[in-house]
Structure formats: structure tokens, C-alpha cells
Amino acid sequence: MHVFDDLDRSLIAILREDGRAPVSKLATILGVSRATVQNRLDRLLESGAVLGFTIRARQDHADGGVRAIMMIEVTGQSTTAVIRRLRGIPELLQLHSTNGKWDLVAELGAASLTDFDRVLREVRGVEGITNSETSILLSSV
């Protein structure tokens, strides 16, 4: 397991804002050499602490579609099996474990309401899911 230091945390914070920043720019911002930044990036990638680099687009600028948050209740000891099955649903964008009344929180995305309805039925049909509550995300503020 990778242990983060202040330089790692700063590097990750900068990359969250600009995942395409060149190594030379990162080095200048952090006040270290390009070689140090490259070594840190390599180590973070090799350890799995950083999974990759991507852009972040505002969701309300996406090309239509439906996004929602689904709270999921799971029966007894079936959480691992439920998670494994849910990860196979392409429209499930993110999945989080949580505490309280709900066991899992999922972010869903679908191209249309018809697709969204299909995804809801697919998730609710997963063995081990006993209850769910879904809220469609209307806009980002």
C-alpha cells in the first residue's frame, strides 16, 4: 500500500484540476525537478494509487442522458456478491459502500428514460438487493 507524503498529495491535487498538465509545469508548481515528478508519477501509477489521467466534463454539458443516485439496501452477507454483479452493469458509473439505512450508493447514467428504466429494473433484479430509492439528478449547481 502506498503511503502518501505532502508532495504526493500536492501532485494529485494539481492533477485533479488539470490531468493534462505537462511534467515540466508540475515540477515548476511543486518546486521540484522534472525527474522527481516523473518518479512520483511512475510510483503512484505502479502502486495503483493513481489509476490514470482523464478529463472532467461538467455533467450538464453532456449530450443529454439521464443521471441518478440510487441508494441500495442489501440482504445479510450478500454484499460482496451484489457488488460483483453491479460492477458488470455498464450504466453504473460509480459505486460506494456507506453506513446508515442504505448499504450502497450508486451513480447511474443512461442515454434515455427508456434505457434508465431498463437499468433500474436490472439493478433491482440483482439477487440480494432488498430495497432501493432512486433520485434523478436534474442539474449541477
Image: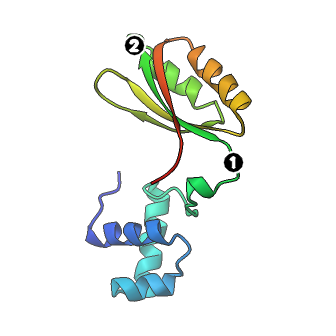
**Dividing the image into 4 quarters, which one contains the C terminus?**
bottom left
- Tell me the element at label 1: loop
Q: Quadrant of residue 39?
A: bottom left
Is 79 rendered above or below residue 130?
A: below
Under circle 2, the secondary element is loop
Residue 139, horizontal then vertical, whole percent? 52, 48
Residue 87 coordinates in the image, percent (x, y): 57, 32
Rendered residue at 57%/27% (across/down): 86
Q: Give left or right: position of 137 versus 73.
A: right
Residue position for label 2: 77
Whole-percent x and y of residue 64?
69, 48
Nearest to N terminus: mark 2 or mark 1: 1
Is 137 left, or right, of 71 in this rendering? right
Mark 2 vs mark 1, CA separation in Å = 38 Å
For the point 70% across and 52% down, which residue is it?
Answer: 63
Residue assigned mark 1 = 64
Pick the residue in front: 82 or 94.
Answer: 94
Q: Position of residue 61 (x, y in %)?
A: 62, 58
Number of other residues with Cα within 10 Å of mark 2, as a class: few under 14, some 14 to 19, many 20 or more: few
Taking the image as shown, residue 109 lies to the left or right of residue 129, namely right
Residue type, mark 1 in image: Gly
